[in-house]
Every structure is written in C-alpha cells, then in structure tokens.
Image (tube, rainbow, N blue to C red):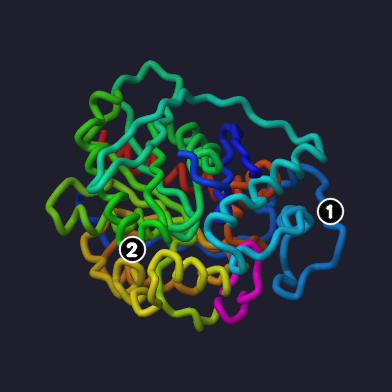
Amino acid sequence: MKQTTLAVAGYSLAIMIITACNSGEQSSSVTHDSTAITNNNGMGKTSELKPTGENPAWAPDIDDEMLVVMEKLQSYGDKPIESVSAGEARKGHTPTDAVMDVMKEHNIPMPVSQVDTMGKDIPVNGGSIHARVYTPKTSDSSLPIIVYYHGGGWVIADLDVYDASAKSLAEQTGAMVVSVHYRQGPEHKFPTAHNDAFAAYQWVLKNAASLKGNPNMVAVAGESAGGNLACNVSIMARDKGIMMPMHQLLIYPVANSDMNSASYQKYADAKPLSKPLMEWFAKNYLGEMSKAKDPRISLVNANLKGLPPTTIIAAEIDPLQTEGKLLADKLKDAGVEVDYKLYNGVTHEFFGMATVVPDAKDAQALAAGNLKSSFNKAR
C-alpha cells in the first residue's frame, strides 16, 4: 500500500484522492468579491518547473507548475479511481505523492514544522472518531481554534495525507487546528460523515479549555467534501442554538447536485477530479443519486441565513467551479459576508500545493488573513 505522510509546514497539501484511512453571530451583508487572478499572481515561480508534454484537452490554459504535478500523478499508471473499489482506491497514488516527487526531483526544500501535534479520540453516536490537534509553538494559553475537515468525497482521505494542510492553517493563523477524520462511505453512508462533523465541533467547544484553546473563538474550515461538512456544521449550530463558528473557510466545496452545470460539462474529464469520479463518490457515500438533492449535500438549496462570514476559494479547472460561485451568490443573497476568489490555471486540489504552485501560496495567505481578521474582531 502506498502511504504518504507529509510534514510540510506552512504549506497544506489538500488532496481529494488519497491513501487508506489510518486513523455565532449573524453576519452583515457586506461583500468582498475578488476578481479572478492571473497566473502566478505576479509572485514569481518557486522554481523553473516545466511540463514535458503539451497542455491537455481538458485544461488548455493550465499553469506550467500545475501541469507538472498532474503529469507526475498520471505517470504512476494507476487505474482510474472510479473503476475500482473504495478499498483499492485508498491504496493508490495521490496528488500528495506527485507533489512530493516533484519537490524531490527539483530540490525544493520542506519548511520546518512550527507546531506540536497530539491525537484525540472523539465519541460519536455508534463509536468514536479520531482527530489530530495542531498547536502553534507559542506561550499563548488560550488560542483561537479552527475545526478542519478534509476532502475525499466522504469516501477516501486520512489525517496523514492532510497533515500539512492542517499545519499550514495553524502556522499562518496562529490558531490551534483540530483536524477531524470522520467515518466514510461505503462503510458508513450519508449522513454519517455530516453527523460526525457536527459531533466533533460540539466536542471542541466543550473541550477547548482543556486543549488550551479559547471556546469563544472557534472557526470551521474544509476542502471539497470537507468544505461541505464545514458549512453544514455552521447550519446545524444555528439550528440547534449553540455557538456559531466565527468564520467558515470553504475551499472548492461540494455544494450542488447538478452534474450538468457549466463547469461539469467543461471539465468533465479534468484531473484529479472529474465527473465520473464525483459520480463514484456519490454512489459510495449516498447510495442513491436522488439523495444528492438533500440540502445537506446541495447547499445552494439550504437555508443560509445567519451564517458566519465566509471565505470561498475556487479553482478554474474543476467540475465544482460553478456550484462554488453559486453558493457564494446564495450566501450573499442571504445577507452573509462573503469573500469569493477564483484562481485561474489551476485544478481542484491546488490549495495545498504551495511548495510548487504559486497560486496556492496566495490562496493560503488569503484564507489565513480572513480567519485572523474574524478572530481579531472578537478579541
């Protein structure tokens, strides 16, 4: 089995295709809508990364650095995930492997970790789930907290693959990050992951002080399926009358059931996320496609009023691009403060690749800045 554990401090490697599992204030209607950025953000490149082939048909405008990672991923020759079982899919190569190999081949160094970690088991209905707590190396005894949910279509993912993603948020915000590994399909069908995500949030609120965190300064964050979970946690907190997250960071979240949207059609064959793979995720977690219309999956049809300030980060080369923008618009219509930013030339999962993809560094800085701003308002 191919297993990768990352320790890339300051740079999250947020991966949707991964290895085996190891393990409330009402916001205003102010809108900060960023325009799509140009390639590399004028920041300069981390190295001279050049792809070996031509731009693929599914991404004619892909950035060079992004294509280098995708070429490496495809070079492993794994079977398409949608053609194998969930168990087999959890053993395959990942974008994490690709980034790590690109770094090695180009002598790109790993930053040294600036956080301490410990594991925690969280009781949930019918069992327990595992979380990893990342604490910045600081003397502060009452840190803000970010509850983070990884991606993987609610089917594949683990804390090890998302280790660096959580580190990045902790290091760049100065907050404690609790990275949650929820139960997944097909072994645990919908809405198990959603219920586990909320149970973990409640656990953090109750145990924040013992972790040396501040129970009054808690945010949620997630990528892809995890972005969906993070938004659901905010909705459930509102509906159940418990403390709302101070901010929600949603990185290319699953937010609709429409697999014939403009971006699904344009990027049906994209890598690492494609339309067939999304259908595979739905089959394994939902069981029936009709359940995708549930507002817990199709967030654009949920009641979004009263949710916390929200940051949505989107990728151009991504079947989920359309629904991410639609969710941003629906949140604004509901009176929620939203900062939406679309990054051109990059694919789904780019956010964690800051060691090799310049846009990821910018996206991480944006996310950290907005989270810190929400925390600072409560100090």
Going from N to C along the chain, the mark reached first, 2 or 1, is 1
- Can you give x and y, in whole percent of width and height, for residue 103 in the image? 75, 40
* Residue 197 appears left or right of 209: right
Residue labelled with disc 2: 190
Three-letter code, disc 1: Lys
Mark 1 falls on what kind of element? Answer: loop
Q: Is residue 293 above or below residue 235?
A: below
- Can you give x and y, in whole percent of width and height, for residue 158 in the image? 49, 45
Asked where in the image residue 340 lies, by quadrant, the reply is bottom left
Task: Give the distance between the C-alpha atoms of the residues marked 2 and 1, in whole angstroms.
Answer: 42 Å
Mark 2 falls on what kind of element? Answer: loop
* Magenta range: 263-275
Q: Quadrant of the C terminus?
A: top left
* Residue 150 appears left or right of 294: right
Residue at the right extreme of this rendering: 52
User: Is 270 within the magenta?
Assistant: yes
Residue at the spot 45% in from the left edge and 71% down from the top edge: 283
- Observer-nearest residue: 17 or 359? 17
Q: Quadrant of the N terminus?
A: top right
Residue at the spot 67% in from the left edge and 31% down from the top edge: 110
Residue 169 appears in the rendering: yes
Q: Is residue 179 above or below residue 90?
A: above
Q: Which mark is residue 140?
A: none
Residue labelled with disc 1: 50
- Can you give x and y, in whole percent of width and height, for residue 68 in the image? 77, 54
Q: Is residue 274 above or below residue 199?
A: below
Label 2: few (<14), some (14–19) or many (≥20) C-alpha neighbours in 10 Å: many
Asked where in the image residue 195 lies, by quadrant, the reply is bottom left
